Image: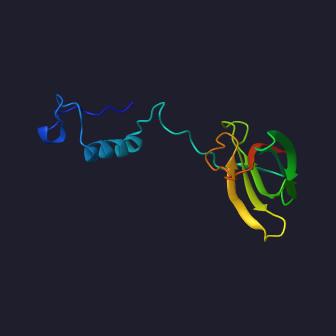
Amino acid sequence: MTTIPVTTTPRSLTGPIGGKRVRGAALAAALLCLPVLGLTGPASAAPVPEEMVSRPAAKLQGLDKITARTSTFTISVGETKALGSLRITLRACKENPPIEPPETAAFLEVIENKPGEQAEPVFSGWMFASSPALSAMEHPIYDVWVLSCEGD
C-alpha cells in the first residue's frame, strides 16, 4: 500500500470553516494523482473488459404506451422487425464474457413509417440492458429496450 505524507495545508488552500475545505484546483490535482499512485477504492469504476463477445441475435422488449401492451421478441443481426409503426433493425449485439460483470449492448436502428409520410429515423445507437435510460429511444408512443443477447 502506498502512503502519502501528510503536511500542513497552507492557509491559501483552505476555506473558512476550520481549514476543512480544499479549493477546487487542489482537490482536482489530488484526485488526478490517485490512479498514478495506485490508490483506488470501492468508488473506482469497474475495469472495462478487453473485448465483448458478439452474439447473432438479441432479445428486445417493446411497450405501446397507448394500450400498455408489452411484447418481447428475438431479432437476428441484420434483421428488421416491426413494432407498430416502427421498424427496428439490429446491427450488433455484444455481451461481456462470463467472468465479467453482466452487461449486454445492442446497436439498433429504428425508423418510423407513418402512413402517407416519408420514413423518419427515430433512433440509431447502442442500448444497454443494465442501464436502459443511458441511451434511450425517445418516442411519444413506443419504448424499446434490450433484455439480452441470444445464441452462441
Q: Position of residue 83 (x, y in %)?
A: 84, 52
Measured along the vertical axis of the image, is residue 82 above or below residue 100? below
Specify the quadrant of the image occupied by residue 16.
top left
Q: Nearer the viewer, residue 59 or 104?
A: 59
Task: Say left or right for 33 vs 57.
Answer: left
- Asked if residue 47 lies left or right of residue 6, the reply is right
| Residue sticking out furthest to the left | 11
User: Residue at the location (87% across, 59% down)?
Assistant: 79
Spot occupied by residue 27 in the image (x, y as percentages of width and height): 29, 42
Position in image of residue 20 (x %, y %) = 22, 30
In the displayed image of the protein, which residue is found farthest to the top? 18
How many marks the image carries: the answer is 0
Residue drawn at x 27%, y 47% as measured from the top left: 25
Residue at image position (59%, 45%) is 48
Instruction: Name which quarter of the figure residue 151 lies in.
Output: top right
Q: How is the image coloured?
A: rainbow
Q: Nearer the viewer, residue 61 or 117?
A: 117
Q: At 52% across and 39% down in the image, what residue appears? A: 45
- Relative to the observer, which residue lies in front, 28 or 73? 73
| Residue 119 visible in the shown view | yes
